[in-house]
Amino acid sequence: MTFFSEERAAELREVFFESSQEILQGLNECGLALEKHADDPAILRRVRRALHTLKGDAAACGYLDMSKLAHDLEDAFSAELPAGKTGALAELVLTAADTFHAMLSAYRENILPPPSEAVRACLQQYLGQHPGQHPAQHSAPHSAQHPGGGPSTLPPAEHSASRGAQFGWSEYEQMMIEEAVARGEAVYNVALEIVPDSPLRAAALQLVRNVLHACGSILALRPDDNVVVEDVKVIEAAVASSRSRDWIEQKCAIPSVVSAILIEKIEDSEMKIVESGQAHLVPQAVPPSSVAALHTVENSLRVDTARIDAVMNLVGELIIGKSALQQIVSEFEKRLPRDPLRSRFVDALAFQSRVLGDLQKSVMKIRMVPVEQLFRRFPRVVRDVAKSCGKDVALTVSGQQTDLDKSILDALAEPMAHLVRNAVGHGIEPSEERIAAGKPARGMVRLKAYHQGNQVVIEVGDDGRGIDSASLLSKAIERGIITREEAARLSPAESLNLVFQPGLSTASQVTEISGRGVGMDVVRTALEHMKGSVRIESKPGVGTTFLLMVPLTLASIQALLFRAGDQLYAVPLTMVLEITRATEDEIHRVDNREVLRLRDQVLTVVRLDRLARTRPVAVARRLYVVVVAVADRKFALLVDRMVGEEELVMKSLDGCLFDAEMVSGASILGDGTVVLILNLPAVTARLGKAQPLEATA
């Protein structure tokens, strides 16, 4: 049974999936921290809080398998921790995070979740149980108590005042209670004893729960819904209510169902109990660090990225409209330069442009997220790969607050994971080899992010053995990727770029952790797809660094517009180094490759008119040369006419309309003209290679 429409339930599930990713990331971090500080109570509280949240949220979405698993783990962590099991504690948390992640993936695909035997076996090993024993059976004192730590039964009403009672709320529930008290709400601890011989016990329990919900907002409730109803003798709750204590007591006095009632009011942040008259109850105080965090006002709002993209598309249409207005005002000025309306048009357009610019920046900031969200994934990756390889490796990060477009951040996850795994598995040497080379036994992997103009640079580096370029060249020649003559002409940087050739690796053997080269072509392809590039810096015996350069956003770019043949093209302005002029006589052929000498540099020539398959320009005509940087190389683009600079709103382009590999997108100008945005890495790779003589005739 569900209380929501299918549409609303789908929205709640999406919120659950997104929030659960943060929770699982927190579990991973807790697991790594427990490997170093297994007895830290603050870390254990974070684990319990995460499990409690997962349990409730999964149950609310109908994912009962996940809720039950989280419930069992929470019970285990709520009990006294077994002595001598500190090593298994971190492994249990990390295995639980992996299991929950697999279950979430299954729920997203609407398929059955995978079995949880691995984490349950880890849990049994941690608790020192025999297979099949339930976690709740671990502690004998626990079996005689309420799941929250309080008594299993209330004393008779006439003896309540003398014997007393306890409400053992979990850490998370105590935080909820403390937050409500801090807001000035009246919070009551309520305990109701169920008549032992009550008929239809399940219905009686549900009736009690309904009455408690009618009394106010339920902050905590014992026992959970999934217990055996015949075993329930007492229901305990923490209720935030605007009603008086007497009103609640009268409401809860259900004939033939409730045999005894205990109600106590929580007065202040120290959770002192007043108005009881029956018992003096002082629950466990909330740790000061947790209390301080309750006082933080939640001022963030989760918004689906599709909604932000829709707003960004509308802003893009406004930018196109602004360009059209600019052209109209410009034409008006030429025709009627002395018309008094001219200045008013100009002022109105300037105001609109300023507001539109602020709107665009605001929407862009909404799309921006810190790269910390990406970097947080990799301590676990480094730990797992290092453990599987028998290496000692640490991870350092810097520049975590560097902002990047969310879509680019998500696209970077897989290529960066591949680079990090390779850095640990292949780049870092074993400890014995490092010590023999005079290095520290512990290897180091570095992640660093920073802004560079309109780009973000992310470095993935290590202090390992570096890349042997000689070995790389030898394997490339052996596999027929390049000839010996071509290898002799390669610069050191071009030699390192051979690692991006499919299947080329410097690893001596293939393992589960691939060597550099296996899949590295996928890394470069992923970067090019997001209009970025990758560069390598490596020194044998010192280490290797991969520099991933990506644009701040894919929504809009500052571009240089020009014509080649009969087509209007654009390239990102950040990739343009300079613009100059040249004639055909200044272009020469070297090894079937056209080159242009510019001062002390020799640049590979790229004729863009070949994209449109138009006839080459006349020999005597002076050409425009646009010098661009692609990765660590420079190219000379030959174009017919310069158009100018303009901000372009990126639009996706159907592959059937144009060569999708050569064009990364399109845009529309104010007059309706379509401009194609070139994918420079693909263009230079295809048109910058050696060409037969007849191709330039």
Image (tube, rainbow, N blue to C red):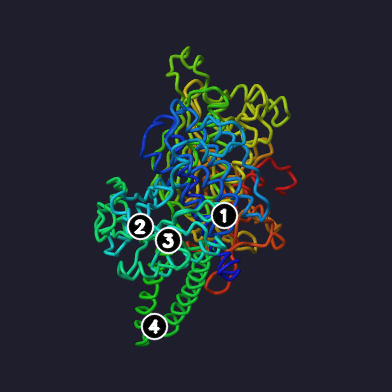
The residue tagged with tag 1: helix, strand or loop? strand
**Farthest top residue?**
436
Depth check, front residue: 559 or 465? 465
Q: Disc 3 or disc 1, which is closer to the eye?
A: 3
- The residue that disc 4 covers is 337
Residue type beneath disc 3: Ser
Disc 2 marks a residue whose amino acid type is: Ala
Mark 3 to mark 1 CA distance (whole Å): 101 Å
Residue 626: % across, % down: 53, 51
Going from N to C along the chain, the mark reached first, 2 or 1, is 2
How far is disc 3 from disc 2 in space, using C-alphas? 8 Å
Tag 2 secondary structure? helix
Which residue is nearer to you in this view: 232 or 479?
A: 232
Please give the name of the residue rendered at 34% of the width and 67% of the height, measured from the top-left corner.
Answer: 241
Q: Which residue is mark 2?
A: 157
Between disc 1 and disc 4, the foreground one is 4
Going from N to C along the chain, the mark reached first, 3 or 1, is 3
Left or right, 245 with reference to 523? left
Marks 3/2 in contact by CB < 8 Å: the verdict is yes
Report the residue at 55% width, 55% height from top.
Answer: 229
Q: CA distance from mark 1 to mark 4?
A: 35 Å
Give the labeled residue for mark 1: 622
Considering only order in the chain, which callout, 4 or 3, is on the residue closer to the N terminus? 3
Circle 3 residues within 10 Å: few <14, some 14–19, many ≥20: some
Type of amino acid at the residue the image marks with label 1:
Arg
Q: Upstream in the sequence, badge 4 or badge 2? A: 2
Q: Residue 576, can we see it?
A: no
- Please say whether residue 513 is visible from this viewpoint: yes
Measured Cα–Cα span from mark 2 to mark 1: 103 Å
What residue is disc 3 on?
259
Query: Eyeballing the image, is 320 above or below 198?
Result: below
